[in-house]
Amino acid sequence: MIVERQRALLSAVLFGALLLLAPSASTARARAPIAVIVHGEVPVSNLSLTELRRIFLGERQFWSKELTITLLMPPRGSQEREVLLDKIYEQRSEAQYQHYWINKLFDDDDGPQIAPKITGSHEMSASLVRVIPGSIALVPANKIPEGVKVLRIGGKRPGEAGYPLTTSG
């Protein structure tokens, strides 16, 4: 009986050690690139990271004279939101992001602002991008739906070396 308990304990310790040493799903997930998708009518196929920041900061509000940009923000806690805060908002926290938009919406100096729309999932983001002209969203690169345009960022497609929208970790 003591030998059986020792074996069970040893098995549990070894299993725990293997779990600690094995790459986790979150580690694999953390390295997946995030794609920038837009409605098919958006007259852009490549943006610099600086231009993308200007869009997500609300500094650029139009694709063209006739086409307004509609920001679709990923839900809190998603990998897309992590990349948004880290790479596009340059390492802002969730609270700093919210503070930024509250100030932006009530600042008369910039003219009227349209608040970003927060979606519930990458599936919702993709569905809305397909139907809202001018919309832009972030989705996992392995979840790009049909019927949307994928933008190059700095000339790079998601997954290419040097693509900037990948979580570090």
Image: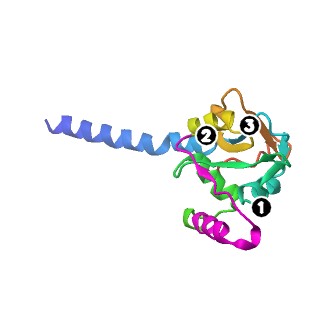
- Image point 68% across, 72% down: which residue? 107
Label 3 sits on residue: 39
Which of pointers 3 and 1 lies earlier in the amino acid sequence? Answer: 3
Position of residue 98 measured from the top left corner of the image (x, y, whole percent): 58, 64
Q: Which residues are magenta?
A: 97-121
Q: Nearer the viewer, residue 80 or 12?
A: 80
Position of residue 52 measured from the top left corner of the image (x, y, whole percent): 77, 52
* Alpha carbons under labels 1 and 2: distance apart: 21 Å
**Vertical relation: 87 (above or below) 158:** below
**Vertical relation: 147 (above or below) 107:** above
* Alpha carbons under labels 3 and 2: distance apart: 11 Å
Please give the count of numbered marks on the rendered protein: 3
Label 2 sits on residue: 125
Q: Amino acid at mark 1?
A: Glu
Q: Is residue 104 magenta?
A: yes
* Dot 2 alpha-carbon crowd within 10 angstroms: few under 14, some 14 to 19, many 20 or more: many
Which of pointers 3 and 2 lies earlier in the amino acid sequence? Answer: 3
- Image point 65% across, 58% down: which residue? 86
